[in-house]
Image (cartoon, rainbow, N blue to C red):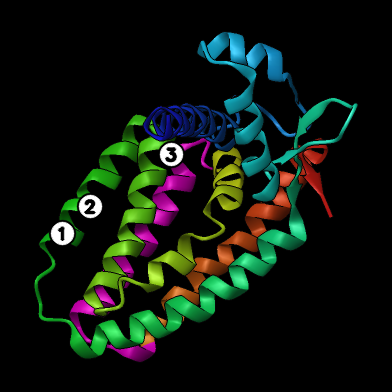
Amino acid sequence: MNVSANSHSDTRHTAADGVFDRLRSDIVSLRLVPGAKVSEVEIAKQQGVSRQPVREAFIRLNNMKLLTVRPQRATVVRKISRSGLLDARFIRTAVEVEVVQRACATFDGRAIGFKRNLAQQKQAAARGDTDRFHALDYDFHRLLCVAAGAEFAFATIAANKAHVDRLCMLSLVDSDAMESLYDDHARILECLEAKDPESIVKMTRNHLSRLDQTIAAACRKHPDFFEA
């Protein structure tokens, strides 16, 4: 009896994870835009599961502030919080400044991973592949944490990733935007290889401050996607 119950629970958990992953991906990629209504019944039908794992996924996404679940009312994709984005940027800047300073002090000169990443970024930008570029962008910053011997710090950097991801999907719509970020990354690597902590901190702050202009431009272009 206990074995059967545990097996059912594991199966249900796996189904809920699958629904969660798919919905989170759809929200972050803007296949489900801010303000869009989502139906528990329709999602269950689309993914071939019962309503229970969908309900569990909705709760998790509500806790992440990606969905707004309201009893007896339609569940909607939550709008992007401008203040939340700025809070996330503040925390990320504080962490990454420490990371790059430590990286400069401990860097062993092996930059193969960085250079491979940058080459792939350049290719993605040339193809206009925003999904691929965005993944490589985050991996570049993970590599900085690895170089600093502080990979644990990437968990903090990525903690609010889903919210910033949606903004990036709005802003990385042309090769120029991706090229600008690629150039920043290339200059950050140059500073790292030179073991120049003052320059790498300045470059990192400048790189992350681009979020301010990105938010302003996205709000002008898509005002209905944002909340205070």
Assign a secondary structure to mark 2: helix
Q: Residue at x 18, y 78 (%)?
A: 193
Tag 3 or tag 2, which sits nearer the N-term? 2
* Tag 2–tag 1 contact (CB < 8 Å): yes
Task: From the viewer's side, name the closer residue of 184 and 108.
Answer: 108
Segment tinted magenta in the rendering: 172-198
- Name the side, left or right, on which 187 lies relative to 71: left
For label 1, the residue is: 113
Task: Name the one closer to the observer, 64 or 104.
Answer: 64
Query: Residue sitting at 37 percent across and 80 percent down?
Result: 99
Q: Secondary structure at mark 1?
A: helix
Residue 190: image x %, image y %?
24, 73
Decide which of 203, 132 is in the foreground and name it.
Answer: 132
In this view, 49 is above or below 213: above
Between disc 2 and disc 3, the foreground one is: 2
Q: CA distance from mark 2 to mark 3?
A: 17 Å
Give the Cα separation between the discs numbered 2 and 1: 6 Å
